[in-house]
Amino acid sequence: MTDPVPAQRAPYNVTVKAGRKYFWCACGLSKRQPFCDGSHSGTGISPMQWEATATEEVWFCGCKRTAGAPFCDGSHERA
Ligand code: FES
Ligand code: FES
């Protein structure tokens, strides 16, 4: 298993829609950040599925070091 790489050292602000499923890129290689585009193939890392319960603005982790995936928990400050 390869370590994730930071896509950016800051979160991605996204307005999610209630009831929609999202696949957060956990590996950092996707070109469609913060979501998975299949680039994790061969890394041993899988995307995290998350379903929005409300239509709202959220902050997805971009550094891939969060302890509260798929969301930013401030860990990028120490990355
Ligand atoms: Fe990163 Fe799929 S491209 S988890
Ligand atoms: Fe990863 Fe903030 S962007 S913890």
Image (cartoon, rainbow, N blue to C red):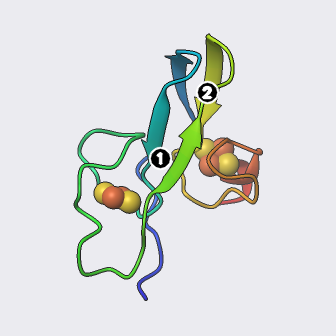
The amino acid type, in three-letter code, at marker 1 is Trp
The answer for how far apart the CA atoms under marks 2 and 1 are is: 12 Å
Question: Which residue is located at x 49 percent, y 25 percent?
Answer: 20
Question: What residue is shown with label 2?
Answer: 52
Report crowding for label 2: few under 14, some 14 to 19, many 20 or more residues within 10 A (C-alpha). Answer: some
Residue 24: mark in rendering: 1
Say if 18 sits above or below 1 in the image. above
* Residue nearest the observer in this picture, 78 or 69: 69
* Residue nearest the observer in this picture, 49 or 58: 49
Q: Nearer the viewer, mark 2 or mark 1?
A: 2
Question: Which residue is located at x 77 percent, y 45 percent?
Answer: 73
Task: Dividing the image into four quarters, tell me where ligand 1 lies.
Answer: bottom left
Tell whether 77 sits left or right of 28. Answer: right
The residue most toward the bottom is 1
Please state the horizontal and vertical placement of residue 17, each as a whole percent of the image. 53, 15
Please state the horizontal and vertical placement of residue 34, each as a whole percent of the image. 42, 40
SS state under label 2 = loop
Q: State which quarter of the image contains the C terminus.
A: bottom right
Report crowding for label 1: few under 14, some 14 to 19, many 20 or more residues within 10 A (C-alpha). Answer: many
Quarter of the figure with residue 28: bottom left
Question: Would the CB of label 2 be found within 8 Å of ligand 1?
Answer: no
Please state the horizontal and vertical placement of residue 71, each as a whole percent of the image. 66, 42
* Residue nearest the observer in this picture, 33 or 47: 47
The amino acid type, in three-letter code, at marker 2 is Ala
Q: In this view of the protein, can residue 29 be seen by the observer?
A: no
Question: Would the CB of label 1 be found within 8 Å of ligand 1?
Answer: yes
SS state under label 1 = strand
Question: Which residue is located at x 57 percent, y 42 percent?
Answer: 50
